[in-house]
Amino acid sequence: MLNVHLVPHTHDDVGWLKTVDQYFYGDRNDIQHAGVQYILDSVVDQLLKNPDRRFIYVETAFFYRWWKNQSSSMQQTVKQLVNEGRLEFVNGGWCMSDEAATHYSAVIDQMTLGLRFLNDTFGLCGRPRVAWHIDPFGHAREHASMFAQMGYDGFFFGRLDYQDRAHRMREKEQELLWRASDSLTPPMADLFTGILPNGYNPPEGFCWDQLCSDPPIRDDPDLEDYNVNDVVQRFLDAAKSQAMVYKTNHIIMTMGSDFQYENANLWYKNLDKLIHYVNALQANGTNVNVLYSTPSCYLQELHRANLTWTLKTDDFFPYADNAHNFWTGYFTSRPALKRYERISNSNLQICNQLEVLGGRVSGKGPFGAGDSHTLRKAMAVAQHHDAVSGTAKQHVADDYAKRLANGWQHCQVLVSNSLASLSGYTAERIYCDNLNISVCPLTESSKKFSVSVYNPLARPVTWPVRLPVNGTAYTVTDAKGKSVDCQVVPVSEAIKEVRRNRGFAVNELVFQVQAPPLGYSTYSVSLRQNRSQPATRQHGAPTFIQNKFLKVTFDPATGLLSSLSNLETKQSIKLTQNFFWYNASDGNSESIQPSGAYIFRPNSSVQFMISRAVKTESIQTSVVQEVRQWFAPWVSQVVRLYADSRALELEWTVGPVPVDDSLGKEVITRLDTSIKSAEIFYTDSNGREVLQRKKDFRPTWQLKQSEPIAGNYYPINSRAFIKDDVDQLTVVTDRSQGGGSMQNGSLEIMLHRRLLHDDFRGVGEPLNEYSDIFPEGLVVRGRLLLSLDRPPSAADTHRPLAQEVVFQPLLSFTNGDLPQTTRLEFSGLQAALPPAVHILTFSQWDEESVLLRLEHQFQSWESKLNSQPVTVNLQKLFSTLDILGVSELNLSANQWKQEMHRFEWTPQKEEKPLLKTNEDPSAWEVTLKPMEIRTFLLRVNVR
């Protein structure tokens, strides 16, 4: 028999054209008819009418909202449907995350949040067995690795490059085994992956939702337009056609689409008839068998087929749905939201850590009731594939940002309570969220204040602090009372331009702080009475700036960078950097594909240089040296080198992007070097493992390149690099961006996009951001950190550097003198962890337990020094916690590790690898191998 698995489903975006709450309630149906609460009401009602019917549900953010509103009897009914397998959860995260613009730590958190709710509510039968990413626009290898480590048996998705699909259909390779790590021992990160036949829609002609217009099955011969024979024949044709491009005698059909099943009776009534009439023909000799099914039932049949499957080791980026339609614009779309999401992630990790370290007083203390779960839910919503991706309507993007801001307000109370408890000082703490534009009312007006620097990393960090001030000379002392070198520098004109009356500081106080692992250090700042002058600005660029690690030279004729040298390794490269833009295609019809929120489509390969020479001024102090460059009224940059830094900072400011020539612009920065990179560059996958990229090339099929720029763009989450045998230039980014290498020795990163047309992919508005503060167009500021190293040791610099940018220290301020009794320094660890080990998660699980994730942050091949197994003693880890018991969980913390059993699959042309088990020296000592994340539930006692 050819078995056709019909999977009734709905795809419910956690925000897109409407906000998440508008979608739930069915509000603003003038924008889009969609109401998730009615979908779940209707589906449950219809499942009860026929025990054969099945339904799958995906987005826990919506299900959680619905579940809270149900009566206990309805909840019992739903539990029975789940226990009987009639309602099945798939994927099960809070949302269906984007795969290009998300950072792995935030993805793990949002999956954990959704899966924990399902586990707590439904137990074993609520645990999803299948990952389901039917809508994201390209697929990241790190996502597959995470899903494998979360215990999923398989993964299904809907979108892949049109050339890739054509090739896979010919070769019957639409189902494959994805080996998603080059460091973890197979099959630890192996994931069976299936590509769905119709995206996630039904076959043409078989959509029976109220949103569709296909004719229903009319099966009364006494009435006109009887069409059973026609429908059955068309279905048999569709099934046989689909079976020709898949390997087994089981095929899957997705019967549903966006926000469908609000009136589930329409679907189920017609599906019941379809199954009945098609199967009735078996008596006449047909070999097609149709059944209600789910992805996990379908996957089980593929597993039983006991075949070998083609092996894939790269990823599914970039994605194009046609020759000129590359979905590579969203890698950069809404750059301010992408940065805000990244900062919010850092704040959430700090909030989680301090909830544990501060004890019970954190949630309810001198500053009131605070919590981490408001920000945790906001961050989980922000991972959705139309959120951090930048592909939602403007009012929805605003809603995502508002949720993050609200979550941070709740966390601030918790953080203040916790720091008060740890320090013994209960004065009000101030958080300055606008330091990137030199705004902080307390530091601008106070003559004496203190700043606490909390470091969420498991090793000490040195971090530059820049505080807006109006004085000209200050004294800074550290927690031990020692004087700290500090300098006052004038605020740049670029900052004054973007502040728009939000702050009035004329200077910045700059000094470097050191903070202990998982702890804080407090610095006291006092205004000095003597009226010395701030550091003077020198007009023009110096010929070079340098510290003990790096030397940077400038071309005196242009004011632009000309070389970068590493003084430790005695290596030097030519390096020029400038800003350019691409003109966007301005098609206002679908015949000419325009650039939009999703799609990057420049109207030519020409890069327009913003300026050949720049106006410059420089400031040189003992703490920092900086060269300020003005490229245009809307583009400026500060090239910065701090005294103790192994990285060169480029702080860019772009906007408002001019569009007075009626063409949208896509703004890039381009680094051109003497490195012989052979048109190869490297990007990270979701902030973790690094993949090689080659211009005009795809590892698994013969590419016909039709878009020489957009078709060579890839997502960069935290770093990209180019290298040859002797030099490696790594660029660490402060948010997710798109980039590529269009010529030998070159690396370009897209920073900002302002477009005047919609790209016809559903969002229905141009990506043209502005606000009350910037009515003429959005201004964006960000940082790139450059390091130059020998390739064999480059990761020793860029791995910790990227973690510092993602999990950055949090500054909090108190006014006036500190009492003598204040504890000025604290570390939650007994000792710093080695550079290879990162504490990924440290959060309160319940009253007696803490969730801990330890991560080895190096790949197996990238460092002689750090790509070695590391053993950590859990009992000797924390300074304020006694560990009473430990149990290991899977990555998503919804299964005990020893109970996680996944389907085994056999790849073609390869012997089956054996998984080497972890050899831990003892129950308390855990060994981490390269790229391994291990998750533990610790039973703790707070000392």
Image: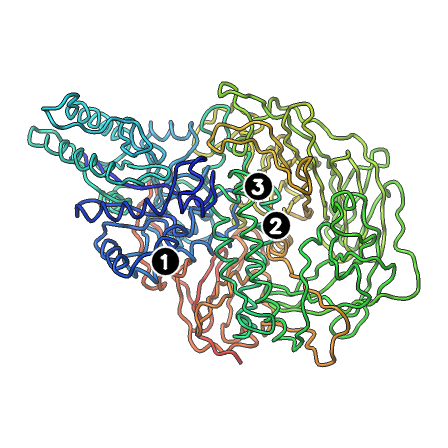
Judged from this view, the residue extending furthest toward the top is 591
The answer to whether residue 869 of the structure is visible from this angle is no
Q: Which tag is nearer the camera, tag 1 or tag 3?
A: 1
Q: In this view, does 602 lie to the left or right of 254?
A: right
Mark 2 residue type = Pro
Labels 1 and 3: the sequence-earlier one: 1
Q: In this view, does 917 lie to the left or right of 637?
A: left
- Residue 532 appears in which quarter of the rendering? bottom right
Secondary element type, mark 2: helix
Mark 1 residue type = Lys
Residue at which label 3 appears: 682
What residue is drawn where x is 52% and y is 33%?
Answer: 598
Location of residue 178 in the rendering, given as x and y in whole percent from the top left corner: 39, 43
Residue at which label 2 appears: 792
Q: Distance between the residues labelled 1 and 3?
A: 46 Å
Location of residue 518 in the rendering, given as x and y in whole percent from the top left corner: 60, 67
